[in-house]
Amino acid sequence: MRSPTRAARSGRRSPGPLDPFAVYADTGESGLRQALATLDLEQLRDVVAEHGMDHDRLAMKWKSPGRVIGRIVERVEAVSSKGFAFRSGAEDSPEGSG
């Protein structure tokens, strides 16, 4: 029979306490960094795991919350800017006209 601690550790991580994409859309990079700074390392790892931000399998091993925050911000910015020209409202922006 498995011990409860082992069984609990072998499951999936908890969902992240916030949606970094929604925070970024509302408050930008500085607001996202401020929101992430209120989380502890395990909560930051939950965000990374929930949103698949550990493509190189390094971020989950990092011990510095600052490094994990940097990864989250980097991935959110990359995904948020991808495909901008195809989003509704893009034609109203200076980049969309031309």
Image: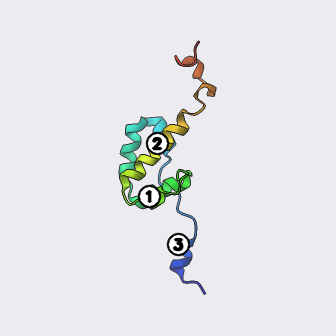
Earlier sequence position, callout 3 versus callout 1: 3
Q: Dots 2 and 1: beta carbons under 8 Å?
A: no
Earlier sequence position, callout 3 versus callout 2: 3
Residue that appears at 46% across and 39% down:
24
Q: Which residue is mark 1?
A: 43
Density class for disc 3 (Cα within 10 Å; few <14, some 14-19, many ≥20) is few
Q: CA distance from mark 3 to mark 1?
A: 15 Å
Earlier sequence position, callout 2 versus callout 1: 1
Task: Say what secondary structure mark 3 lies in.
Answer: helix
Question: Residue 97 placed where, x, y %?
Answer: 58, 14
Q: Which residue is mark 2?
A: 74
- Kind of residue at badge 3: Arg
Task: Say what secondary structure mark 1 lies in.
Answer: helix
Up-down relation of residue 84 to residue 66 (above or below): above
Q: CA distance from mark 3 to mark 2?
A: 28 Å
Q: Which residue is mark 3?
A: 9
Density class for disc 1 (Cα within 10 Å; few <14, some 14-19, many ≥20) is some
